[in-house]
Structures are given as C-alpha cells and as structure tokens.
Image: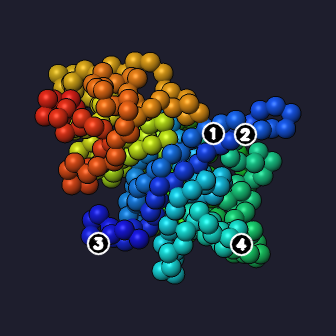
Amino acid sequence: MAESSNGNKPVLLEVNNLKKYFPINKGFFKRVVGQVRAVDGVSFFINEGETLGLVGESGCGKTTTARCILRAVEPTAGEIRFLTNDGRTVDIATLPEEEMRFLRAEIQMIFQDPYASLNPRHNILDIVGEPLFVIQQMTNREERTERVRELLQLVGLRPEYMQRFPHAFSGGQRQRIVIARALALNPRLIVADEPVSALDVSVQAQVLNLMLDLQQKLNLTYLFVAHDLSVVKHISDRVAVMYVGKIAEISPTDELYYQPLHPYTAALMEAVPVADPRIRSAMIELEGDVPSPANPPSGCYFHPRCQFAIDICSKEAPELTELRPEHFVSCHRAQELTLEGIGEPR
Ligand code: SF4
C-alpha cells in the first residue's frame, strides 16, 4: 500500500490504474465492435477516517468507479487494494467471490434514492436487521431488535418507529434508515453515491452533518460520489475531479476550491455559489457536451471544450502530475496557466 498522505492514518483503500470497459455488441452474433471506456486508468487512495469526494458531470465514470470498488461490476483491469480489519491487504479486483462476501461487511454502500433502496413491504426492524440476520447470522430476534434500536438512535430516529414501513417516513428519514442499515455490520469504508441529491436542500445539510458526526464517532472512511461541488466541499477532506473516465485533478479540498489548477475544474467552480458576490474566479465557460466514452477525443479528452488548448493537447494525453504537495493535475499547461491566473484565488 502507498504511504498515508497525513503520515499518521494508514491508507485504507488504494485504487491503481482502474479500468472498466463495457463492450459494444452488434449484429446477430453480438460481435464486439467497440468499447465504452467508462473508467480509464483511475488511481487514488483514501486514508482511514478520511473523506474523498469524487465529482464530475453525469457519465464521467464516478458511479462505475464506486461500483467497481464494491465489485458490483467486474473491473477490466487495475488494482483495488483494501486494508482489512485483521491487517491484511487484499486486492478487491481479483478477490474470489467467497472472500468478497465477508469483505462486504467492511465496505457498505449508500445509494442516491433512499426509497428505491428500501423494500416497501418490510418494516424498519426487518430492513435494518436484515444484514445482521443474513451476514452476521444473528438469529435471536431480541438481540437483533436491540441492535436495530441502537442503530436507529445512532442515526437520530426514534426506536419506536421500527415497526413502521418506509412509506411512513420523509425522504431525509428514509436516508437515515439506509445509513442505519449500512452501519449494521460496523463497516470501515462507506461508498456513498449521490446520497443527498434526491433530498430537499434543507434536508441535505442535516444528512451531511449526520454523516460527519458518524464519521467522528465511528472512525468511518467515506468515498463520497456527487456531481454537486458545494455538497462535496462540505464533507470532503480531499476531492478528485473526474472527466470522461479519468482523474483530471485531485487535491485537498480547501486548495481545490481556492485555486483549481485544471481548466475543467475551474469551469465547474464557476457554477458553485460563493457567499460574497465580489469574489469571482477567472471566468471560464464550459461549452459543448461531454464526449462519449465510447469514442473519446485524442490527446487530452477535454481539448474540444478547453479554451486553453494548444497543439499538443489534441495529440498527447497529459499525465497526472503533482504540481503542489498532494495536489495532482492532468493538464499540459497547468503550471503556466496557474501563473497566468486561471483558477485565480476565490
Ligand atoms: Fe486544456 Fe490542454 Fe490542459 Fe487539456 S491539456 S485541459 S486541452 S490546456
């Protein structure tokens, strides 16, 4: 495993050159005529107890990356190294399914739509108690009920509600139930895929604060996937920005928001509301559409939309390079553009 960036906490998850290609089939014999490069060489790590935000526009590969980490889809190539509870490092990408079943207790997922992830025919006791019964083999109903009671209290819900069904709860309460179920097996890593984007803005902050609170109490590690940069800013220690299956920039949160180094990140920042209207970053327009990962452009994938593109940008793919301590960027011109004032401090 790589060394922890903060020197103290161990690296819990390390993703190296992860790729997930989906074949494009055509014709009666389903001949493979191409590949959708949903994730195309992604690398990052997360320290124990840290939150890494993974952001980007729809279709950039962030959800596929998250699903590879859970082995909900099989990675095409690359490593997903995870430090287990008993101190072993395993490669999730190649772990036999039998071992993966046990590892799933340590890695849990929270999905975007809390209603869709709760069985409407089961009450909350059965929903939150299900992983205890199925995976932890906690067959004693009283013991299970007691644990569900604890979990509901932990997420700020009244234990008396455990006989109710999902339709009796608001969106925010349902997401709390989903979180309670995710916590049932004492996971160490939680992969949260757009966990608040289906909620009202007023409720989003409550759920984010709950997640922060639980992180403190339980030393949880989060991979927080979202398209909304202001949400990610609130919860993340570091942020990775994805574009067409690749990492464009990865940096400590404050530094990324204060001075982004990649033109794409700077353009995304334009959409983030700032408290003081006099504070503006350099105006960078994001024009055109995200290219298809089935047919990405040559060189830097961002070049058809980048107002700073030069000759080399359409020919050579830039490497992800550390320009400042812990601040990596994938752009041929990042150094020089920073000096010229792109990503001017906000
Ligand atoms: Fe723009 Fe070129 Fe940098 Fe890509 S490499 S972001 S096209 S300047």
Q: x, y (%) of residue 292?
A: 55, 29
Measure the alpha-carbon separation of dots 3 and 4: 32 Å
Residue occupying the point 63% across, 39% down: 35
Q: In the rendered image, which residue does mark 2 sit on?
A: 32
Measure the alpha-carbon separation of dots 2 and 1: 8 Å
Measure the alpha-carbon separation of dots 2 and 3: 47 Å
Residue occupying the point 14% across, 29% down: 340
Q: Helix, strand or loop at disc 3?
A: loop
Among the 4 quarters of the image, the one containing residue 25:
top right
Of pointers 2 and 3, the one earlier in the residue sequence? 3
The residue at the far right in this view is 28
- The answer to whether residue 127 is left or right of residue 276 is right
Q: In the rendered image, which residue does mark 4 sit on?
A: 98
- The type of colouring in the image is rainbow
Q: In the rendered image, which residue does mark 3 sit on?
A: 8
Q: Report if the CB atoms under discs 3 and 4 are less than 8 Å apart.
A: no
Residue occupying the point 71% across, 72% down: 98
Neighbor class of circle 4 (other Cα within 10 Å; few <14, some 14-19, many 20+) is few
The mark found on residue 35 in the picture is: 1
Q: x, y (%) of residue 152?
A: 58, 59
Q: Report if the CB atoms under discs 4 and 1 are less than 8 Å apart.
A: no
- Badge 4 amino acid: Glu
